[in-house]
């Protein structure tokens, strides 16, 4: 098998994860550094390239489609391979891949959308779906799915269609994804005679296991081995804890944070999470709140026995000499729950070639594309994952199995999550982690009030 490493960009999706019909040509890639309007249909060795919207093709001419992605470097390889296969089967269409370097992919897309000059196919991450759809960026896909070139949506693994839906319609289809799971270092477990975690374990089991593995090896009163590396003030990852406690962060109608962010279930989740840091001291303190998930490196350095996280670093962990890697599903709280992180593709609403764009999209995210994605990520097509042996794999199978336990994330109920509740929840998590004596209920009540005030203002605009 080739390199099996999830390519979703994060936090925008840190990275969002091809032209001619002759074998001598490689798929075209245009890397965009800054925007200067220059018309191009071939690889151009200039620092900045923006392709003008193509004119309707003359009779017999090839259709040129533009595909925008935030992937870069080796992450472009699967795109190029899929493009080459599609162009072999569809000689009337040429694909131009536009890879936007840097962390401002969404800003560039929004600028292109406003100018009516966005790529025909665009890749975005899950929590950006409501905002882009509300801005009219994408075409709904439902008629395409049932149309002249139909797509059987029953081919997909559980839960991977929903993140591309908004207000009852399908706008995007899955590229790659990950739920959460718990990585564990068998070497540390074996050293201290602790049993490996098993499917069906609970929060109590997690705490007991972490306590057994937290060690002061030199007797100086400081932990040298930690039970588990947690995710600090990473709000998106924290949604798992809320769901597993039986709670939710927002009302079903998307209008209320009050009564949800400060519910007994939410308070229980925050209390347990903070206690693992401050009371039981089984998790290393956050290295830097300004860094993603606290910026800790204890697990990869071999000084933390477990880490709860997504699949993104798994390829590196497999090659890490400090680790003898195992993976298990997340523990059960009041209920079994997980959350999904997802990247997908949709069709620009201003595309002049929507039918051709759909033909490519259904190939990109269908069985043909999945045959390529499987070497880089878990493919969203169930049969491809099965045939590749991923479903029964002791590590990859965990990620697939966890798709059966998904709870909806808060962003699916409001396009304003990132502007309202996300900063309030982040501040609350930082407060309880910094101050061991913080009143969790009061902190969460304040967070709910701040989020509600910000949401009310947005809804009144």
Image: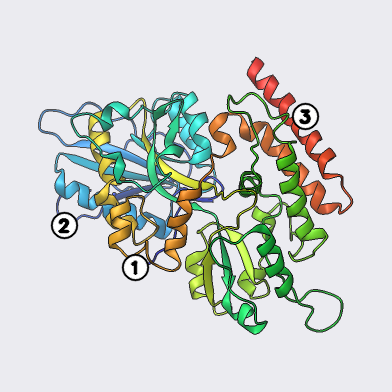
Dot 2: element: loop
Mark 1 and 2 residues: CB-CB less than 8 Å, in contact?
A: no
> What residue do we see at 34% from left, 68% from top?
2
Q: Specify the color scheme.
A: rainbow
Q: Quadrant of residue 160?
A: top left
- Horizontally, residue 51 falls left or right of residue 149, namely right
Give x and y (percent) for residue 136.
Answer: 44, 23
User: Which mark is nearer the camera, 1 or 2?
Assistant: 1
For the view shown, which residue lies furthest in the left direction?
60
Mark 3 and 2 residues: CB-CB less than 8 Å, in contact?
A: no
Quadrant of the frame with the N terminus: bottom left
Q: Toward the viewer: 186 or 197? A: 197
User: Which mark is nearer the camera, 3 or 1?
Assistant: 3
Of the numbered discs 3 and 1, the one sitting upstream in the chain is: 1
Residue 143 image label: none
Q: Is residue 181 above or below residue 243?
A: below
Residue marked by disc 1: 2
Mark 2 surroundings: few (<14), some (14-19) or many (≥20) residues within 10 A: few
> What residue do we see at 71% from left, 67% from top?
208
Residue marked by disc 3: 449
Cα separation, mark 3 vs mark 2, equals 61 Å
Residue 23 image label: 2
Q: Is residue 129 above or below residue 306?
A: above
Dot 1: element: loop
Of the numbered discs 1 and 2, the one sitting upstream in the chain is: 1
């Amino acid at each position: 098998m080739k390199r099996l490493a999830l390519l979703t960009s994060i936090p925008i999706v840190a990275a969002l994860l091809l032209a001619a019909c002759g074998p001598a040509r490689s798929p075209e890639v245009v890397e965009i550094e800054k925007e200067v309007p220059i018309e191009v249909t071939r690889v151009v060795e200039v620092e900045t390239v923006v392709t003008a919207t193509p004119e309707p093709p003359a009779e017999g001419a090839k259709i040129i489609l533009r595909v925008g992605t935030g992937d870069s470097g080796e992450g472009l390889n699967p795109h190029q391979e899929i493009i080459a296969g599609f162009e072999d089967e569809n000689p009337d269409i040429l694909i131009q891949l536009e890879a936007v370097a840097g962390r401002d992919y969404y800003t560039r897309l929004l600028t292109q959308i406003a100018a009516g000059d966005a790529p025909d196919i665009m890749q975005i991450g899950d929590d950006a779906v409501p905002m882009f759809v509300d801005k009219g960026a994408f075409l709904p896909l439902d008629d395409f799915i049932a149309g002249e070139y139909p797509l059987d949506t029953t081919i997909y693994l559980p839960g991977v269609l929903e993140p591309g839906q908004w207000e009852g319609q399908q706008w995007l289809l899955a590229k790659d994804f990950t739920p959460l799971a718990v990585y564990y270092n068998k070497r540390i477990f074996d050293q201290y005679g602790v049993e490996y975690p098993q499917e069906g374990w609970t929060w109590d089991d997690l705490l007991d296991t972490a306590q057994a593995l937290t060690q002061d090896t030199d007797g100086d009163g400081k932990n040298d081995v930690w039970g588990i590396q947690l995710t600090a003030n990473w709000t998106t990852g924290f949604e798992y804890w809320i769901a597993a406690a039986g709670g939710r962060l927002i009302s079903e109608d998307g209008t209320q944070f009050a009564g949800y962010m400060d519910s007994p279930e939410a308070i229980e989740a925050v209390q347990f999470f903070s206690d693992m840091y401050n009371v039981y001291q089984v998790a290393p303190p956050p290295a830097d709140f300004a860094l993603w998930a606290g910026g800790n490196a204890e697990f990869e350095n071999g000084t933390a026995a477990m880490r709860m996280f997504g699949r993104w670093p798994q390829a590196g962990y497999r090659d890490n000499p400090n680790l003898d890697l195992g993976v298990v599903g997340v523990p059960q709280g009041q209920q079994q729950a997980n959350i999904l992180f997802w990247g997908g593709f949709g069709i620009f609403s201003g595309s002049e070639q929507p039918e051709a764009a759909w033909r490519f999209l259904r190939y990109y995210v269908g069985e043909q594309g999945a045959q390529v994605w499987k070497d880089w990520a878990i493919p969203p097509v169930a049969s491809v994952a099965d045939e590749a042996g991923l479903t029964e794999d002791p590590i990859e199978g965990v990620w697939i199995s966890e798709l059966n336990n998904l709870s909806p994330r808060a962003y699916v109920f409001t396009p304003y999550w990132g502007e309202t509740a996300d900063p309030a929840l982040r501040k609350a998590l930082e407060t309880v982690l910094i101050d061991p004596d913080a009143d969790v209920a009061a902190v969460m009540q304040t967070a709910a009030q701040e989020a509600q005030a910000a949401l009310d203002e947005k809804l009144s605009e």
